[in-house]
Image (cartoon, helix red, strand yellow):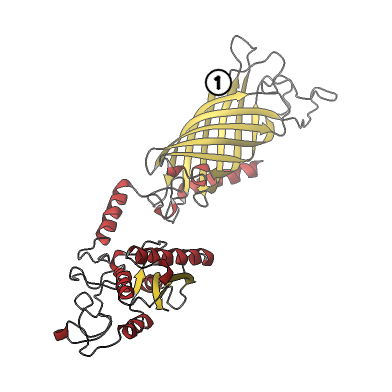
Amino acid sequence: MKKSLLALMLMLLVCLVVQAQDEYNKWSIEINGGFNKPMAPLSPGYLSPTLNLGHVGLGARYMFNEKFGLMGDAGFGRFREARGNSPEFVTDYARFNAQGVVNFGRLFNFESFTQSLGLLFHAGPGIGWFTNDDRPTLDFDRDYLYHISSGFTGQVKLSDRFALLGDISVHFNGRQRYTFDGRSFIIPPLAELDDVRLAHTTGTWWTGTLGLAYYIGKADTHADWYIPGEKYATKEELATQMGEIRNMLKDSDGDGVPDYLDQEPNTPAGARVDALGRTLDSDGDGIPDHLDKCPFAPGPASNDGCPLEEVEEIDYFRKAINEGYLNVYFAFDSSKPLNYSSSAANFVANFLKRNPGVNIHVKGYADEIGPEDYNMKLSERRAKAVVDLLVAAGITQNRISHQGYGEDTSVDKSSAEARQLARRVSFEVD
């Protein structure tokens, strides 16, 4: 018994001097005081008050992480009679426990609605003794016992160093010779009055206390209140992040490409651009598409970008298709065409109007992010959205076919720019 008590006291001493070297503190020391209530067994006619002021406790706790830990604690107090309703008795006690701790506050994400309230559950075995001078035999001065304790501790965070504690605990004694009042054996002696026996009868009592926890360590917060990865930002942090997002989404030149992606931030009004905001020159004749009257047939500026000799437009259109100049692009997980690229559908519609004998096939694609079957359906919706644009522009439905081809695996899926190019609808002349 003495060795066990010495080991527990050494553990408490270590708790006072060791400090955690981590992103959060792990050690705390706790002191409390309050009420106790011995339940059964009591001698016939002996009663205890519902709330008996007479318990003090001291503990030290170490948290392995923000959810689980260990605690060593000691409790001292006195049981008394319910005055006016019971014969007098005075029983002093001491108990020492080693308990496991579960932080329900972190386990059940209390931080989603409060960052100042917590709840701990603790349970574990212990040893202790009762002392009463009015026992029927005095052959031993203490009634030694072992027990199991469990309870809940509510927490209110006062600062980074202190927390207010309120605890309710129940203690089950596994070996107890005397009743709580000390006036009789739980099981009478077999023969003589001094025949000391070990009675394996459960005694039950509880404590209710208020106290303080002091957190030890160099970090700014304790494991009780630590939120991994700063999951929940403050209002000020959210406001700052929202402002940064708004700045990123600005489109200074109005070409449909936000500034943070736009590699040509001063595109002229009405210019047709690619996914990175660069002005397109589809036929490579040096005249941008929005100024070129023949954007898919190269020609000199003196002829407004059209060839000097008559050329079959359909051949250049097919060339533009084969080289991937005409595409309608989409945002991530969206079937709504991006504004800057919808002009490609207008070019196709104008061409079909001038060439009534030509049909068009619309092909939808998606990037490789997400489930393959979902991306197949997304690519079909994108193709159908572009078909709707062509029909709205005056092209009859029987001249248009469409199909979703799912994921475009030809691009580098680790590149955001490449994934944007994969989220597209392209065309094929039938």
Residue at horizontal 52 percent and vertical 36 percent from the top: 153
Q: Residue furthest front?
A: 357
Q: Nearer the viewer, residue 118 or 242?
A: 242
Residue at horizontal 56 percent and vertical 33 percent from the top: 75
Residue 81, percent from left and from top? 61, 16
Label 1 amino acid? Leu
Position of residue 338 relative to residue 230, above or below, is: below
Residue 425, percent from left and from top? 40, 71
Residue at horizontal 33 percent and vertical 47 percent from the top: 234
Q: Nearer the viewer, residue 255 or 182?
A: 255
Residue 385, percent from left and from top? 40, 63
Look at the image and tell me whether residue 367 can be seen: no
Look at the image and tell me whether residue 209 can be seen: yes
Q: Nearer the viewer, residue 357 or 337?
A: 357
Residue at horizontal 39 percent and vertical 70 percent from the top: 424
- Mark 1 crowd level (few <14, some 14–19, many ≥20, 10 Å Cα): some
Quadrant containing the C terminus is bottom left
Q: Residue furthest bottom?
A: 309
- Please give left or right for residue 356 compared with residue 309 in the image: right
Quadrant containing the N terminus is top right
Element class at badge 1: loop
The residue carrying mark 1 is: 51
